[in-house]
Image (cartoon, rainbow, N blue to C red):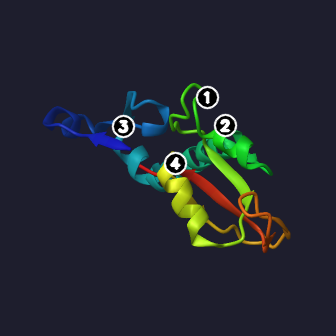
Amino acid sequence: MTVEIGPRDLENGSAFVGRRDQGGNRQGMDCEELVQGVSEILEDIQKVLYERALAFREEHTKTIDDKDELYAFFSDGSQGKAIHGGFALVHWDRDAKWEEQLKNDLKVTVRCIPEGSEEEGTCIFSGNPSPGRVVLAKSY
């Protein structure tokens, strides 16, 4: 949120307010109204940005159970060049060599082990038992 108040604005008891969640478009607002409503405005901005980020995460997260599918998800397909493909939920046996291989091959690393990810399965790299899924994403 940006607030601009110049000398004339002070005389008129007004300010210009821009919300970054709405493209920063500025609108005139009474200073008293701004002071009374700033908490509500900030809470609304937080809610909008959070919901936008959550929708983005959900849209760009894929559950993957195959190494070739994982490589395709993070590659452009032509020469195996790494691209940003979002987030992949995969089974991993927690052996660091697979993370190192992903980092070297695709610049992909383990981002987190989600709470409640105790769903047992098979590691897509080794075929060994996996204690649960992890989130993989491209590193920068």
Would you say the residues marked 2 and 1 are in contact, meaning their CB atoms lie under 8 Å apart? yes
N-terminal of the pair, mark 2 or mark 1, is 2
Going by the numbered disc 4, the residue's amino acid type is: Asp
Q: Are marks 2 and 4 in contact (CB under 8 Å)?
A: no
Q: Is residue 118 left or right of residue 20?
A: right
Q: Residues within 10 Å of mark 1 (few under 14, many from 20)?
A: few
Q: Which residue is mark 3?
A: 17
Q: Amino acid at mark 2?
A: Ala
Real-space Cα separation, disc 2 to disc 4, in angstroms: 12 Å
> Marks 3 and 2: which is nearer the front?
2
Q: Which residue is mark 1?
A: 77
Q: Which mark is residue 105?
A: 4
Q: Position of residue 43 (x, y in %)?
A: 54, 54
Task: Say whether marks 4 and 3 touch (CB < 8 Å).
Answer: no
What is the distance, in whole Å, between disc 4 and disc 1 at their CAs? 13 Å
- The residue positioned 39% from the left and 29% from the top of the image is 27
- 4 or 1: tag closer to the N-terminus: 1
Q: CA distance from mark 1 to mark 3?
A: 46 Å
- Label 4, secondary structure: give it: helix
At x 71% / y 65%, what residue is drawn?
92
Say above or below: 108 vs 133.
above
User: Which one is closest to the eye, mark 1 or mark 3?
Assistant: 1
Secondary element at image label 3: strand
- Out of 37 and 18, give the one closest to the viewer: 18
Q: Which residue is mark 2?
A: 72
Amino acid type for the residue under numbered disc 3 = Val
